[in-house]
Amino acid sequence: MKQLYFISVFFLLFACNKKETQQSHASTDSIKIVDSINALRTKINDSIRNRNHFELMTGTHTFTHSEISGKGSVVFKKVEENNDEYEISGEIKSGKNYAKIQGSGIRVSSKHLNFSGEISQSIQNNDNGKMYIRKGTKTFLSKDGGKTWRLQDMVNSSGFVDYIDIKLK
């Protein structure tokens, strides 16, 4: 009887150990699988986030205002290497009339550029040259495939429409 008791205890010890080994091995495998999936997702997300979705706009371009004769210039500099974000600065001046643009822009579609910053102007025909400043996020829209971008906040402080355009070279 004692032999039967020892054999059953011996059998139970080995049977329990094998099950525990199999369970920990399975959990280790699932952890490795989850880690490899997460690494792959991170790689895909980084490649999407870091590539340009639209053609480059870097360089010096033409800056015009409907109430100012002549042309000015505006410079687009990339903020990050593989992104659609730019630092934007430029001005146009003719006599006492001038307009300045300073801020950053993100191209969000083939037709839309969101500009965040300041566009200031002083036009003698509007309130005797009183300074008017557009602040915050404004949209530039292109209807010709990205060659000309027009500010959509067109009404100035005098209630008249200003056409502020950026023409890419």
Image (tube, grey):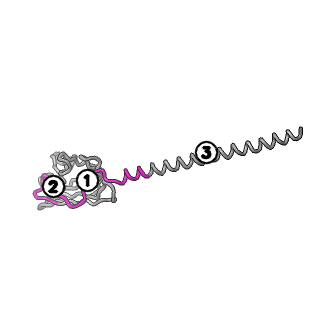
Q: Amino acid at mark 1?
A: Glu
Asked if marks 2 and 1 touch (Cβ < 8 Å), the reply is no
Q: Residues within 10 Å of mark 2 (few under 14, many from 20)?
A: many
Q: Earlier in the sequence, mark 3 or mark 2?
A: 3
Q: Which one is in front, 10 or 73?
A: 10
Q: What's drawn in magenta, residue-wise?
A: 43-72
Q: Which one is in front, 51 or 71?
A: 51
Marks 1 and 3 sit apart, C-alpha to C-alpha, by: 48 Å
Q: Which one is in front, 24 or 67?
A: 24
Q: Quadrant of the C terminus?
A: bottom left
Asked if marks 3 and 2 touch (Cβ < 8 Å), the reply is no
> Residue 48 in magenta?
yes
Q: Amino acid at mark 3?
A: Ala
Q: Nearer the viewer, mark 1 or mark 3?
A: 3
Q: Which mark is residue 64?
A: 2
Q: Residues within 10 Å of mark 3 (few under 14, many from 20)?
A: few
Q: Residues within 10 Å of mark 1 (few under 14, many from 20)?
A: few
Q: What residue would you read off at disc 1?
A: 55
Q: What residue would you read off at disc 3?
A: 26
Marks 2 and 1 sit apart, C-alpha to C-alpha, by: 22 Å
Q: Is residue 33 left or right of residue 157?
A: right
> In the image, residue 22 lies at what x, y percent?
65, 45
